[in-house]
Image (spheres, rainbow, N blue to C red):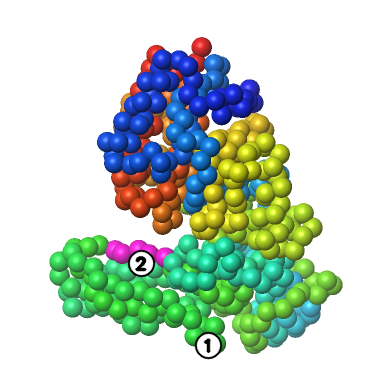
């Protein structure tokens, strides 16, 4: 895909409807479709543009209207990530000691040093532990000290609000984080009347399971699972209720509360599994500049990180990246500083200031607002660099295939693919990205809705609208 495909002019972004008969017809059909789904156009900001060859504005419904964009915000964050980090960039997690290894005993403290890796998990931890084992270490006499000073110590940015939840979307943030600071719980029914099997991944001794789930006949499910924090920092997963044999396994995710303690506990858990004993306890501290480096783990590259961000719409990854952007620009590793830099960078895209407001890299804040016209300018900005754009495109969910679009299928045989970022918070539903026809026609689009209509109705409207655009063979083919 060449750069010329995406040099949209301001004429196409702001002139409203094109003068062609087709565009007028498609505009009318889009409005009729909104009426069919009982969605008021006043609640919408939509812009659809054909790109490549003869460029056209296909649909314009309030394209300059600023609306809450929810997780479509992660497109903005992606743009900034691509400006700040090379495509082969990797975040590094390290372990070192202030002591020495004597006769298979590490005499001193072991430091686990976070480098802001948003996707550090079991694979990385295993690699660090195996590197230590290869050095012959069988015993550690000191403490496990977790250094997460690479970022500030704010776990929950104020843009999230002051109400906490134990779901994965509200996971805390820390420079030393592990497995997105969350656990996956699988509950499998057993024999009628017996306890169901409970599996927690990653296995650890930080989150303790309390209570049980009873197996019963039928397909019902009244399982209640709550993650709570004790005063000593220990996390408890409280389980109660029952699960029908016919229901099958139940899978859900819960976050943890203290990234540093959580990471340290998982390090100790892995060390013990490898036969390495630890005498000390888990503390938070700062590693000495001197000392013996023992191992390091280089995480996913930029494509891997952006895929975690966009395909799964991971809020934790978004906020970690904002803090990393701040550090990259020699600022304190805070979301506040990261967002300031993101906003400075988007100014270069000639967006209309009255159609843009960005305070949260994840999109959890209703104050994140944008017009569809400005959203297409951000997509244009990403597309201005061919290599970066290819990576961004690979990171997006694909309709009917993966991520948050896995269950969304566009009912048109003429669609080769739809790659787009979804967005949903209470009162806001969004979809933005690209659709490609079998003949190579490429369309960029931004759909944003604010209102109280049911999510399914709005998403169905979006999917039918894309199909309607793609089904117009003669009028939008590239010449």
Q: Residue 186 carries which label?
A: 2
Q: Which residue is drawn at 45% across and 70% down?
A: 165
Residue segment shown in magenta: 249-253
Q: Is residue 299 above or below residue 179?
A: above
Left or right of 201, for residue 331 = right
Residue 202 appears in the rendering: no
Q: Residue at x 74, y 68 (%)?
A: 294
- The N terminus: image quadrant: top right
How far across and how far down the image is residue 430, in percent?
45, 45
Dot 2: element: strand
Magenta region includes residue 44:
no
Seen as rendered, the residue at the extreme right is 290
Using the rendered view, name the quadrant where residue 237 is placed: bottom left
In the foreground, 201 or 223: 223
The alpha-carbon separation of the residues under discs 2 and 1 comes to 27 Å
Dot 1: element: loop
How far across and how far down the image is residue 184, in percent?
42, 66
Q: In this view, does 432 lie above or below 191?
A: above
Magenta region includes residue 250:
yes
Q: Name the residue under label 1.
A: 231
């Amino acid at each position: 895909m060449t750069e010329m495909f995406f040099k949209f002019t301001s004429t196409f972004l702001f002139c409203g409807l094109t003068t062609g008969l087709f565009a007028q017809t498609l505009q009318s059909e889009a409005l009729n479709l909104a009426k069919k789904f009982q969605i008021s156009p006043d609640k919408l900001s939509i812009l659809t543009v054909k790109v490549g060859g003869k460029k056209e504005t296909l649909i314009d419904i309030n394209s300059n209207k600023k609306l809450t964009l929810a997780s479509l915000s992660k497109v903005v964050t992606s743009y900034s990530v691509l400006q700040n980090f090379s495509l082969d960039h990797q975040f590094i997690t390290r372990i070192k000691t202030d002591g020495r290894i004597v006769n298979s005993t590490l005499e001193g403290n072991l430091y686990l040093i976070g480098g802001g890796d948003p996707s550090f998990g079991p694979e990385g931890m295993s690699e660090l532990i195996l590197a230590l084992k290869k050095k012959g270490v069988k015993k550690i006499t000191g403490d496990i000290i977790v250094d997460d000073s690479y970022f500030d110590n704010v776990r929950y940015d104020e843009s999230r609000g002051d109400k906490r939840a134990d779901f994965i979307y509200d996971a805390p943030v820390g420079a030393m984080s592990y497995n997105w600071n969350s656990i996956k719980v699988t509950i499998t029914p057993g024999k009628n009347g017996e306890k169901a099997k409970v599996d927690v991944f990653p296995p650890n001794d930080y989150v303790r399971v309390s209570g049980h789930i009873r197996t019963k006949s039928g397909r019902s499910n009244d399982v209640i699972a709550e993650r709570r924090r004790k005063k000593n920092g220990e996390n408890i997963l409280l389980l109660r209720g029952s699960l029908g044999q016919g229901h099958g396994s139940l899978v859900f995710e819960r976050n943890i509360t203290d990234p540093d303690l959580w990471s340290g506990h998982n390090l100790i858990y892995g060390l013990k599994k490898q036969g390495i004993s630890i005498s000390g306890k888990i503390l938070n501290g700062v590693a000495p500049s001197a000392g013996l480096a023992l191992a390091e783990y280089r995480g996913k590259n930029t494509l891997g990180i952006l895929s975690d961000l966009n395909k799964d719409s991971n809020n934790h990854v978004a906020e970690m990246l904002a803090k990393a952007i701040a550090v990259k620009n020699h600022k304190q590793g805070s979301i506040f500083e990261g967002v300031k830099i993101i906003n400075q960078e988007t100014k270069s895209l000639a967006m209309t200031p009255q159609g843009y407001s960005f305070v949260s890299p994840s999109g959890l804040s209703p104050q994140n607002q944008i017009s569809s016209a400005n959203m297409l300018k951000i997509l244009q900005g990403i597309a201005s660099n061919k290599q970066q754009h290819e990576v961004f495109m690979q990171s997006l969910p694909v309709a009917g295939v993966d991520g948050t679009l896995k269950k969304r299928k566009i009912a048109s045989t003429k669609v080769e693919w739809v790659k787009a970022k979804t967005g949903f918070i209470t009162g806001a539903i969004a979809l933005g990205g690209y659709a490609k026809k079998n003949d190579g026609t490429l369309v960029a689009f931004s759909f944003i809705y604010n209102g109280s209509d049911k999510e399914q109705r709005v998403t169905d409207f979006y999917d039918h609208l894309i199909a309607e655009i793609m089904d117009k063979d003669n009028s939008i083919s590239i010449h």
